[in-house]
Amino acid sequence: MTLLGAAIRLAILLALNSFVSTLPAPSADTSPPSLTLANQSLTSDRTLTSTYSDAPPLLIEFCGTRKPEVERALLAANRVANSARLVVGAGIGSPEYKAMFENNAVQPRVAIYLNMIYDYRGSINLKPAPQRVTAPRIACATPGSAKLYSYLDLGYDPWRRCAAAAGGAPTEAFYADGSVYIFLCPRFFQQPLAPFGSKCPELRDNLFAGDVSIFYRNYQVYTLFYEFVRLYLGTASLDSNSIPRETFDWNQCVGYSLLTSIKNPTNYVLFAALVAQGCTAVPDPEKPPFSDTRSLASFNASMSAVATA
């Protein structure tokens, strides 16, 4: 890494490590707000606007006194997206990018999605108004959400989905497929906003090791970031029914192929979290167990060794 590159990375890390303390304190104002963040142009996509200003501002609905907390989480996710998009230009020169996306061929696509989150960009072909550009909407789920959002024809009650997600456990947030809505559940507000300082994972035998929750999973900023990735990937996103299936395992994210990695939401979250926390000790996808010709057996064996270490 060049001295200039190291200096840029250090500046980004110092700025992000302090962003929690510099965020404005929540206000008591509960008037219906709109959160408008910086606008950036990017390569057009068939479901995207050419500029964020083509859509109304992002809306926060039915969050009451929790609204300032949601605004803080949105601002934090915006800053994390900004740090990641500044690094993605380095391509495989960035160890974090190489670990998650393997090759420079997908650089433009990764940059587009990071820019979308940075802009909170409006989309078309999504409920409730598929015929026009609509900005993302954040809704706090309540016992009355089924009635309030009946016009979305979701096929489920958002409040009940919060209580029992697909795996049977309560969830923090979820993206409502086919819409511009991200629903926040009560558990979201039990999470801390973001990690203080760096909580980088360990690296053992070219594999991530350590507590994934301490690194990124148990924070509002990354929960929200993940849901925005789901929103913008849309039907291209891997899920529990796709082939291959969506994975949340950080080592499986490294092992995913080039074209699969850009469809897996957790790859984007891990990339952003690694950059935000200055974690450069990451697996190399060109080395074993990922490059081994007996990759599946080798990978599974290595995973077992790490788990029991």
Image (cartoon, rainbow, N blue to C red):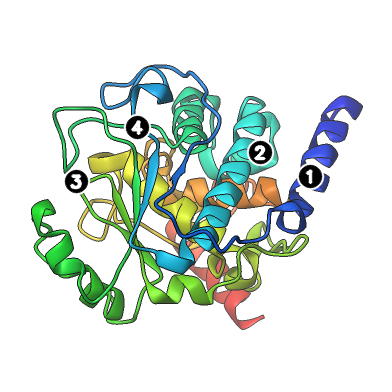
Q: Nearer the viewer, mark 1 or mark 2?
A: 1
Q: Earlier in the sequence, mark 2 or mark 4?
A: 4
Calculate the distance from the C-alpha at mark 1 to the C-alpha at mark 3.
35 Å
Image quadrant in which the N terminus is located: top right
Calculate the distance from the C-alpha at mark 1 to the C-alpha at mark 4.
30 Å
Q: Nearer the viewer, mark 2 or mark 4?
A: 4
Calculate the distance from the C-alpha at mark 2 to the C-alpha at mark 3.
28 Å
Q: Earlier in the sequence, mark 1 or mark 2?
A: 1
**Residue drawn at point x = 27 percent, y = 81 percent:** 168
Calculate the distance from the C-alpha at mark 4 to the C-alpha at mark 3.
19 Å
Can you tell which quarter of the image residue 308 is in? bottom right
| CB-based contact (under 8 Å), mark 1 and mark 2 | yes
| Residue topped by disc 2 | 83
Q: Earlier in the sequence, mark 4 or mark 3?
A: 4
Q: Earlier in the sequence, mark 1 or mark 4?
A: 1
Q: Nearer the viewer, mark 1 or mark 4?
A: 4
| Residue topped by disc 4 | 56
* Crowd around label 4: few <14 · some 14–19 · many ≥20 (10 Å): some
Secondary element under disc 1, as helix, strand or loop, is helix
Q: In this view of the protein, which residue sits in the foreground, 255 or 25?
A: 25
What amino acid does circle 3 point to? Gly
What amino acid does circle 1 point to? Ala
| Residue topped by disc 3 | 178
Q: Is residue 293 visible?
A: no
Q: Say left or right for 246 vs 213.
A: left
**Residue drawn at point x = 70 percent, y = 30 percent:** 93
Give residue 157's position: percent from left, percent from top.
16, 70
Q: Earlier in the sequence, mark 1 or mark 3?
A: 1
